[in-house]
Image (spheres, grey):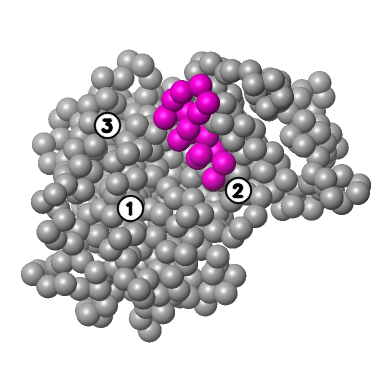
Amino acid sequence: MFNLLVAGSPTWWETSRFSIGVDRFKEHSDPIAAQVDLDRPETLAILEQIPTLLMYEVGANGQHVRTVRHGRVHNITRVGRELDFEFLLDADRSYLDRSDVLRFSSELGIAPFEQHRTHWAIKAASLPAQLLDLARSEPVRRTVKIVAGDYTAAIRDKQQAEVRALRLELEQFPQSLEKALALIPSRLARTATPEHYPIIGVEPKTSEGRNALLAVMARELQDEELPDTWCFSLAWFLDVYGSPTEGHQLEAAVRQCASHMIALGGADADQVLLIEKIGFVLWRSARSPALVGRLRREIAMLMDRLLSLQTIGGWWADEHDDQTLTTIRGTALAVVSLQRLGDDRYHDAIKKACQWLATQGLSNGALPRFCEYGTPDLIATTLAMEALRRSDLLADLPHVLDAGDGWLMSMQTDDGHWESQDWTPDFTTSVVLDYLARQSEMLSQVDGFLLMARDFFRKAEELRIEGGANNRRLAAISTVHAVEMFLYGLFERRDDLGLSAFKENGQETLGPREALRVLQDALVRIGVIAPPRTLFRRDKLSSLIGRRDGIIHRAFEISEAELMDGIRHSRAFINEYSKSLLKLDLLQ
């Protein structure tokens, strides 16, 4: 037996003495409540001997509405049309979350309607031990992460009143990256947006990753309003999260992407400026190893077209509403595409464009879509900030980047997402979050070992695709150079390892084998590797280095399978240690 008191006012249970109307007394009570009668005041003592829950109505809005108090009522007094009483919290199990109480609603006899009505019910059931085990001695602080988790659960359970109440609670939290990230699962509960999954740490080749894949494939089959460029999202996602089971869907998506690129590079396209569209498809392709590898010629064609259309001042022009305008969004798309896909041949074009972008900010830190219009543009600002962070101007532009990032955060909506006129809110949010949450992983375009490592690796993949015995030999050599340059760049950036790329004479570099050995010793010393474990993929890399030596000194051949195996292990090695030791997405 227990008392359940429900109030609609969001501060009703926040005082020291309480009351409830006698007309609501014993509503939704069980038959056992007949032993309590207001005309016999002595029977009210029964209520002081049983546990009591003080709860707010579902749908009430306020800071405390999800907190349920557990204890006992005492000093019950009738004053006119009100029952006044005091309340003593249980000493050890004082506070519960309303969602926990409602999970036991069947056992407790709490009907759906009474969850939305102010009343005092007397229930025959006992409070389950499993419920009381969830109680705390102090109220749980409702952080944005907790509220977002409840919001996601309410969406999945289709509890619309709870969704509305939680949304209002979420709106009380200030704009922040934490808020946006915490709300991504709620967005996924409604729409399976491929780009959201890696942002919240869903890993490929796991059960969670498989569930994500099934959700995206279900959307592919059921959603009749997919954007025209959905194929780029699907190709990237299937490449990263898929398996051979989805091979035919990946092939179809790649073909659709190729069609988009061919249309943009065809003879008809030469008659108009399509900078934003060209930049967009290149930018989307840059994220997918499958598209970069399979559509190398189409990508090269569009990159060459971009370069041919760049103005002497570094920007690009585009056609919009029958006008030729200076496009900041298109310039930013073009730059990020060249940064992610190109090598040092594009360095001058990138630098000129970044120098120009750095001067286009408005007084609030944002950038417009077109120079001719002064309206801040979310997409242009996000991509321009990324372009500058990836440029060799990074160290000179903290004021520009801080202002731009501040404006982006100010544009977050009350429920933690971002909106733009041209893209869906889900995709727009994923783009802004991908930038804000992964700034430290962006490789600035500064000459050095790490940039050389990235370019050597790209060259290896290009040579492998071109095929032929000599190209395979060159690809193997380039892959080993990529690993070696990465190791030297790692030694430069991690002073705590106490390593140098050079031998004691200061002239000769260590070479890849010795560099792998000293890295392993250093990681053991600082506790990253615990013996008898060895450096990740070290044996596979040593095998590739041996094949490289055979190519250089004896003109040995390397098979396609051996080369692909070496490139795969090298990619895994660089990805593992660039992220874990440098917090960089080196191969981008």
Q: Kindly state the secondary structure of the residue where label 3 is placed.
A: helix
Q: Nearer the viewer, residue 401 or 99?
A: 401
Judge whether 230 appears above or below 63 on screen. Answer: above
Q: CA distance from mark 1 to mark 3?
A: 21 Å
Residue type at tag 1? Asp
- Residue at the (51%, 54%) spot, across then down: 344
Q: Is residue 256 visible?
A: yes
- Residue at the (83%, 45%) spot, across then down: 508
Q: Which one is earlier in the sequence, the residue at label 1 or at label 2? A: 1
Q: Nearer the viewer, residue 549 or 437?
A: 549
Please state the horizontal and vertical placement of residue 503, each as a whole percent of the image. 87, 44
Q: Nearer the viewer, residue 174 or 102?
A: 174
Where does label 2 land, which residue? Answer: 452
- Residue at the (69%, 20%) spot, across then down: 554
Kindly indicate whether the residue at mark 2 contacts the one at mark 1 (C-beta within 8 angstroms). no
Where does label 3 land, which residue? Answer: 254
Please state the horizontal and vertical placement of residue 541, each as a whole percent of the image. 67, 25
- The magenta region covers 455-471
Where does label 1 land, which residue? Answer: 304
Q: CA distance from mark 3 to mark 2?
A: 29 Å
Q: Which numbered disc, 3 or 2, marks the residue closer to the eye?
A: 2
Judge whether 521 appears above or below 184 on screen. Answer: above
Q: Kindly state the secondary structure of the residue where label 2 is placed.
A: helix
Residue type at tag 3? Val
